[in-house]
Amino acid sequence: MFIYNFKLNGNKLLKYIVTFLCVIILILCGFSIYKIFGNGIFKSHVNDEFKKGSINEINSRNYTNVLDEVHNNLDLYVGQKIKYSGFVYRIYDFSDDQFVLGRNMIISSDFQTVVVGFLCQTNLAKNFTDNSWVEIEGEITKGDYHGEIPVIKITNIKQVNKPNDEYVYPPDETYVPTSTIL
């Protein structure tokens, strides 16, 4: 028969508890700092998925991530070929051969939207009315519209029906809306 003598030392127990809590707090602080500042450290770029020479298709799930990534890192994407669909959207200072191929991005829980998309350029632009849905193939180039932005030089364009998934959502968890009222 074995007998164990178990004696609690209050000072040692308190030291262990405090040490354990400090370690937990440090882990939580490290995780929080990583989420705030280190989000892009291990994040793969959209360019990692894009292949030179092939046509990369943009869909509703990756639409705003691609849009954000290309705008932020334009030099990496110049020359890439893309294909996607959206609606023709024009504003007053576009030339006759320009339009934005846009989608409505939902920015709030009450379904407020904002138009997002790439500026596109083609001689056939005048053949498509505002709000008509088209699918384009083109190449990403550098352009100028109130500063340097990506412009899609369209190589193929055709009219399509409005898709079931016409809305897109903010790029990722780092998106912070700048306003609740547009």
Image: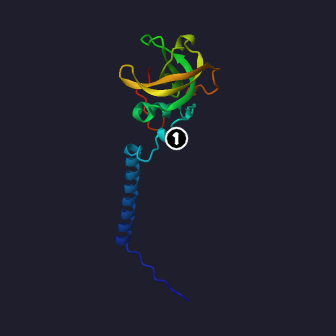
Q: Is residue 27 above or below residue 160?
A: below
Seen at 53% across and 10% down, the residue is 126
Q: Amino acid at mark 1?
A: Glu
Is residue 4 shown above or below 149? below
Asked if one can make out residue 20 in the rendered structure from this viewpoint, the answer is yes
> Helix or strand or loop: what does disc 1 sit on?
loop
Query: Can residue 179 be seen in this snapshot?
Result: no
Residue where numbered disc 1 is placed: 49
Q: Provide residue 7's location: percent of width, then percent of height.
A: 42, 78
The x and y percentages for residue 70 are 44, 32
Decide which of 146, 25 is in the foreground and name it: 146
Residue located at (41% from left, 45% from top): 35
Write the residue at 36% across / 59% down.
22
The image position of residue 30, as x and y in percent, is 38, 52
Seen from the viewer's position, the closer of residues 5 and 16 is 16
Q: Quadrant of the N terminus?
A: bottom right
Which residue ends up furthest to the front in the rendered image? 53
Image quadrant occupied by the C terminus: top left
Q: Toward the viewer: 157 or 103?
A: 157
Name the side, left or right, on which 19 lies relative to 117.
Answer: left
Q: Is residue 58 above or below residue 126?
A: below
Q: Is residue 145 left or right of residue 126?
A: left
The answer to which quarter of the image holds residue 27 is bottom left
Q: Residue at x 49, y 83 (%)?
A: 4
Q: How many marks?
A: 1
